[in-house]
Structures are given as C-alpha cells and as structure tokens.
Image (cartoon, helix red, strand yellow):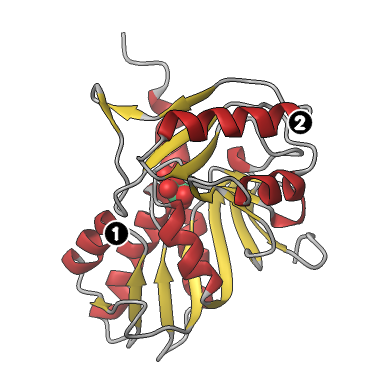
Amino acid sequence: MTGEGEPMAANSEALKRAAAARALEEVKPGMRLGLGTGSTANAFVELLGERVRGGLDVRCVPTSEATAALAGQVGLTLATLDDMPELDLTVDGADEIGPDLALIKGGGGALLREKIVAAASGAMVVIADAAKLVGTLGRFPLPIEIVPFGAEATRRAVLRLAEAQGLKGEVRLRTRDGHVFVTDGGHFILDAGFGAIPDPAALACGLAGIAGVVEHGLFIGLATKAIVAGDGGVQVLTRSANTES
Ligand SMILES: O=C[C@H](O)[C@H](O)[C@H](O)COP(=O)(O)O
C-alpha cells in the first residue's frame, strides 16, 4: 500500500511552487532581494535561478546558510546584508499567516536572520500554500530563539510571561537527531505550544523584554503581501486591506 500522505504532499509542493511562481512577478531587473528559508522559499529560489540564467540581473541576500547554498547552486549572485543594508524586496515562506498578515516563522530555525532581512526590505512578500492561513495564530508552536547560556532559566521566564498573559502549553527546547538544535547564529530554539494566541502584539512585546531571548517568530507589521496558493487558485492578500486583489 502506498503512503496515504503522498498525494497531499505532492499537492502541497505544487501549491508552494505556484505561489513562488506568482511571486516572481514582483521581481524587477536590478532589484536587491532578500531570500527566505524553507521549502516554499526554496521553490522561489529555484525559479528565480531559472530567470537569472535567462538574463535577469538581481542581487540576493540569503537568510540562512541552507538558502545560500541553494542560491549558489542555481546561479544567483549573493551579497551580505552588510554589502547591501537596504533591500527592495524579500520573498519568504511562513509557518502561519494570520489576520493583518501577522506571521509565525522559524519552523526551520532561521527566524532571526529572516526578521533582520525582512526589516531591511522595502517590501516583504510571503508565499505559502493555503494550509498556512489561520484565523488566529498559534496552532503552530511559536519558535523563540534564545542564547544558550541559561537556557532553562530563559525557558522558565517564557513560561511565567505566558501565564501572566493567560497562555498555557509546553515550552520545549528544540532538538534534532537527539541533539539540541543550534541556529546559524549559534543560538537555541524554544518551541512554545501555547495554542491560540489572541494578542500576538502583547506576546511579542513581552518576549522582547526577557533576558536571554534573542528574537521570536512573531512577525507583525512586516509582511506587505501574501501570495497563497490553494486548490481554487492563487490568492493575493495585502496587509492594508487583507483582501484579495
Ligand atoms: O525558519 C524557517 C522559516 O521561517 C520558514 O519560512 C518557515 O518555517 C516555513 O517553511 P516552509 O516553507 O518549509 O513551510
């Protein structure tokens, strides 16, 4: 018997690629681009590579070592954010897209560089399949990047903040293959399974005030547009109106 998840996975990949293809329309010659991280961002990088090999001239800042490696393989011209501190456009994926294009990001552990690059960009386009759209953020555990020193003390401080804000759920140190997961920046990640987050801005503010927290995966007010591919086609949402265009 073949795996029941295979057709859905294949469909999900096709939807990610459809969203990535639509995002290419946002790219103009000469642009300075931020490249996100993750499977959806990878689809964009691959399609962008095809355009660049066809003559499109853009320069790109990757948000992770993994994206840098892929971008190099497909022939993109790379720069650091220090080389190009101001970018025209960042195209990135997301773990969840909520009201007003507030996002949860960091499932792949790249949230710190992703947020720095998005903040340095004139526009941020999020690409995703429709399964990422939610009415309230929080079904996906919120990634929180922390300094390794005092990780348990920081985890407890996050729990105290959550309790004070009426949030419940486990906060776990992320591991991979039996080892603590370490980000490109040398930090750890806490995954906070709070469930619904009714006030993302208040949580973001509280997390920013905890010693040991480097950054969190709530991206509020950064995405300017979301390109979401579903079975019914590709939908474009904008932050101002959050409506189809
Ligand atoms: O750290 C990873 C990033 O925030 C990704 O954009 C996010 O996890 C979505 O990844 P994917 O496109 O693979 O679902």
In the figure, 226 relative to 99: above or below?
below
- The image's mark for residue 23 is none
Query: Quick one: 210 or 12, which is closer to the camera?
Result: 210
Q: How many marks?
A: 2
Residue 6 left/right relative to 134: left
In the figure, 32 relative to 38: above or below?
below
Residue 236 left/right relative to 199: left
Q: Is residue 226 visible?
A: yes
Query: Quick one: 179 or 213, which is closer to the camera?
Result: 213
Quarter occupied by the N terminus: top left
Neighbor class of circle 2 (other Cα within 10 Å; few <14, some 14-19, many 20+) is: few
Residue 73 left/right relative to 81: left
Earlier-in-chain disc, 2 versus 1:
1
What residue lies at 68% left-to-right and 53% top-to-bottom?
102
What residue lies at 59% left-to-right and 75% top-to-bottom?
123
Q: Amino acid at mark 1?
A: Thr
Q: Secondary structure at mark 2?
A: helix
Q: Which residue is mark 2?
A: 164
Neighbor class of circle 1 (other Cα within 10 Å; few <14, some 14-19, many 20+) is: many
Q: Which residue is mark 1?
A: 67
What residue lies at 34% left-to-right and 81% top-to-bottom?
82
Residue furthest out toward the bottom: 30
Location of residue 207 (image quadrant): top right
